[in-house]
Image (cartoon, rainbow, N blue to C red):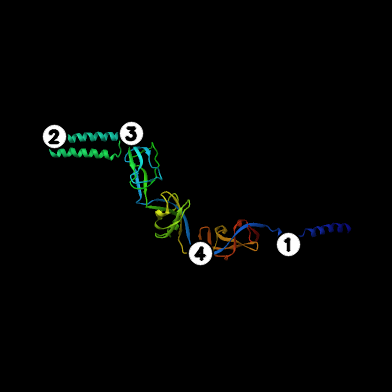
Amino acid sequence: MKPFALIALPLMLAGCGSAETPDAAEKAKPTAMVRVASAVTGARSDSVVAYGTTEAGPSADHAIVAPAEAIVARVAAPTGTAVAAGQAIVVLRPSPGSRTALARAASDVQVADAAYARALRLRSDGLIANADVETAKAAAATAHSTQTNLGLSGNGTTLRAPVAGTVAGLTANPGDQLAAGAVIASIVGRGDLRARIGVDPAVALRIRPGMAIAIQAMNGGASVTVPVVGVDPQVDATTRLASVFVRVPPAAGLSAGQPVRATLSIGATTTGIAVPYAALLDDGGRTYVFVVRGGVASRVAVVTGNGGGDTVQILKGINPGDRVVIEGGTALDDGMKVRVQ
């Protein structure tokens, strides 16, 4: 019996020494570090943020076209240059093919003029009828017209701005050969500028002409509110977006080809509780947030409403003033202790 008692006594003492008190167990629970934000009451509308680019309006884009096959000799006003009506844009010289055509046209003019002069002399001598003179006159006029329509001279041709505006789309460089009829650049007239905004096709169905839309340059600046003038539901093959058009007033200070940010309200304004989007978490399609009370994070299911900017409306689940976790929530479990940064 004595050996058994000697062995049992240390075991009993060891068991007594390893038992944890309730306070120690509580202190051993993991604690997470989180950031929180307060749920607030406010008005929210169903708004859409989209992006686009300014472009010339239908009546403001004036093309500069190569009148014949030619070579770029000099670019006088590159893209982005503000020009006055009549200002030089680009200087062209004939290509080898155009030089041959010019020489042929000049020769045809010389021959036709000589034939017409001869017909006039013969008529004065009574040797030919008036009809023959008129035929020679018409042939000379055709030869001159052909030469003029070539649109080039052997010494070079300067193409000028038809209206005051801004040069756009000029990509040709000195030495480039251009085909007859090729668009060299365009002059975007002042006072007729629009913006093409790309939106989701489903959103495009809810937009109507006359709706107000706020636009501003992507690099900052003041926002200007303008009405929608048209909606094209046709989906762009590259962006997979439909297009919304707005007219850009001169006071906006924008130029053609400038990227813009647009904000459009497409739903009624409602009042409710709002929290940052960062607070929302998802579990198989069920949206929830963590609410911190007394140093403990509780998981709360919520129903969301309209969104706008960086916040979203909460229709059900939390109350104004509740502190929701906006950073560190993915590492939390329901009932976990937290420390707020």
Q: Position of residue 315 (x, y in %)?
A: 53, 65
In this view, 131 is above or below 286: above
Label 3 vs 4, first from the N-terminus: 4
In this view, 69 is above or below 243: above
Residue 149 appears in the rendering: yes
Q: Which mark is residue 122?
A: 2
Residue tagged 3 = 96
Which of label 2 and label 3 is nearer to you?
Answer: 2
Disc 3 versus disc 4: distance between alpha carbons? 70 Å
Residue placed furthest toward the left: 126
Label 1 vs 2, first from the N-terminus: 1
Disc 4 versus disc 2: distance between alpha carbons? 95 Å
Residue tagged 1 = 23
Q: Position of residue 253 (x, y in %)?
A: 42, 52
Q: Position of residue 304 (x, y in %)?
A: 53, 62
Amino acid identity at mark 3: Pro
Residue at x 83% of width, y 57% of height: 10
Q: Quadrant of the C terminus?
A: bottom right
In what element is the residue under mark 3? helix
Which of label 3 and label 1 is nearer to you?
Answer: 3
